[in-house]
Image (cartoon, rainbow, N blue to C red):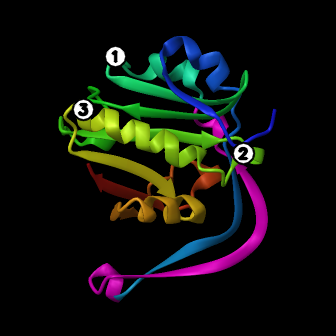
Amino acid sequence: MKNDSYEIKEMDRNCFELYNQVPQNVDVRSEYRVTRIDNGLGGFVFEEVPVTPYVKDLSKYEIASEYENMFDITNWRFYMAFDGDIPVGAMTVAGTTEGMDMLGGRTDACVLWDIRVADYYKHKGIGQKMLDMGIAAAKADGYRVMIIECQNNNVTACRFYRKQGALLSKIDMNAYDSEPEVADEVQFVWHLEL
């Protein structure tokens, strides 16, 4: 059952029950500390610093079955990875969507809305294969850029996006001020040219 051949396929909105079964845990052992130079006019310094290890469960923020309550998902694509019948990975790429702030009004950009791999299956290439499928479809749909959000405490994701060739294009040190539970996190927004 646990092997290196996983089926990865595009799904439709009927997959949400299975999608929600895939955990989205971030194993945090370090974070990027962002320091402003000359109040930001001189740039920023990024320093990876160790933290007391903890697990951040992002699945409580990303519940696929609630997407339709927030947005028109007509232009969204969903991907899942399976080990036999067990869902072990899931990913959403949001295409042109009215009211989606991350797109900034662009019609030539899509958003990597969510990507997750179950803990046991991490570091086996599943996330890369899903992303490759999503990028190929985004290109075929005519998108030129994929916008990706993560936080300074998700160092693994930052490294993964950098490895894809994504450029860090926005740093918002106050993005989560209205959310006390995560107010100390820094938003990183990446742009991946397609």
Using the image, tell me which numbered label, if any, was put on residue 140. 3
Give the extent of the magenta segment.
Answer: 38-62
Q: Which residue is more in the foreground, 50 or 23?
A: 23
Residue 89 in picture, x, y percent from top left? 62, 36
Q: From the image, which quarter does the N terminus lie in?
A: top right
Q: Earlier in the sequence, mark 2 or mark 3?
A: 2
Foreground disc of the pair 1, 2: 2
Secondary structure at badge 1 equals loop
Task: Tell me the residue that label 1 is attached to.
Answer: 74
Please say whether residue 23 is one of the residues in the magenta stretch: no
User: Mark 2: which amino acid?
Assistant: Tyr
Count residues near mark 1 (Cα–Cα under 10 Å), then give few for <14, some for 14-19, many for 20+.
few
For disc 2, the marked residue is 121
Is disc 3 surrounded by few (<14), some (14 to 19) or many (20+) residues within 10 Å?
A: few
Q: CA distance from mark 1 to mark 2?
A: 30 Å
Residue 114, compared with residue 162, is above or below; it is: above
Q: Is 183 located above or below residue 7 in the figure?
A: below
Measure the C-alpha gap from mark 2 to mark 3.
29 Å
Q: Position of residue 155 (x, y in %)?
A: 58, 65
Q: Going 40% across and 59% down the picture, which residue do you hit?
A: 164
First-in-chain label (3 vs 1): 1
In the foreground, 43 or 144: 144
Q: Residue 139's image quarter?
A: top left
